[in-house]
Image: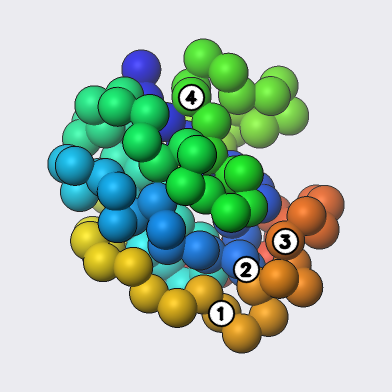
Amino acid sequence: MSYVVTENCIKCKYTDCVEVCPVDCFHEGPNFLVIDPEECIDCTLCEPECPAEAIFSEDDLPPEMEHYAQLNAELAQQWPLITEKKDPPPDAEDWNGVPDKFQHLER
């Protein structure tokens, strides 16, 4: 089991979670982060650090977010590793909590 970054991270891309990860399993895309399920050790440290509340245990994924488990696995193989906290996008707060953001995901 691993943790999964879900829809509310899109266009928010806070990186507080990256800073606490002991195994460097986060990967960064243009406007979204993902967790590599092969690297995640299920330590639970990232989940409470996410200001957008976009990280879930794979076992606790809401049904409408289940496809994000596969998306995280896929994009983690394509995107570079991120190991340090960065500033969020300037409009991150405007996007936090906005529903139906999947169409805004940049690959």
Q: Is residue 18 left or right of residue 81?
A: right
For the residues labelled 2 and 3, the Cα–Cα distance comes to: 8 Å
**Residue 96 rendering spot, x and y as whole percentages:** 72, 61
Under mark 2, the amino acid is Lys
**Residue 95 rendering spot, x and y as whole percentages:** 74, 67
As drawn, the residue found furthest toward the left would be 23
The earlier-in-sequence mark between 2 and 1 is: 2
For the residues labelled 2 and 4, the Cα–Cα distance comes to: 21 Å
Crowding at label 2, few (<14), some or many (≥20) Cα neighbours within 10 Å?
many
Q: Quadrant of residue 68?
A: top right
The earlier-in-sequence mark between 2 and 3 is: 2
Determine which residue is flagged by label 2. Answer: 11
- Is residue 71 visible in the rendered image? The answer is no
Dots 1, 3 in contact, CB < 8 A: no
Closest to the observer: 100 or 103? 100
Identify the residue shown where x is 61% and y is 85%.
90
For the residues labelled 3 and 4, the Cα–Cα distance comes to: 20 Å
Determine which residue is flagged by label 3. Answer: 96
Q: Quadrant of residue 105?
A: bottom right
Dots 2, 1 in contact, CB < 8 A: yes
For the residues labelled 1 and 4, the Cα–Cα distance comes to: 25 Å
Identify the residue shown where x is 65% and y is 73%.
92
The earlier-in-sequence mark between 1 and 4 is: 4
Secondary element at image label 3: loop
Determine which residue is flagged by label 1. Answer: 89
Crowding at label 4, few (<14), some or many (≥20) Cα neighbours within 10 Å?
some
The earlier-in-sequence mark between 2 and 4 is: 2
Determine which residue is flagged by label 4. Answer: 57
Dots 1, 4 in contact, CB < 8 A: no
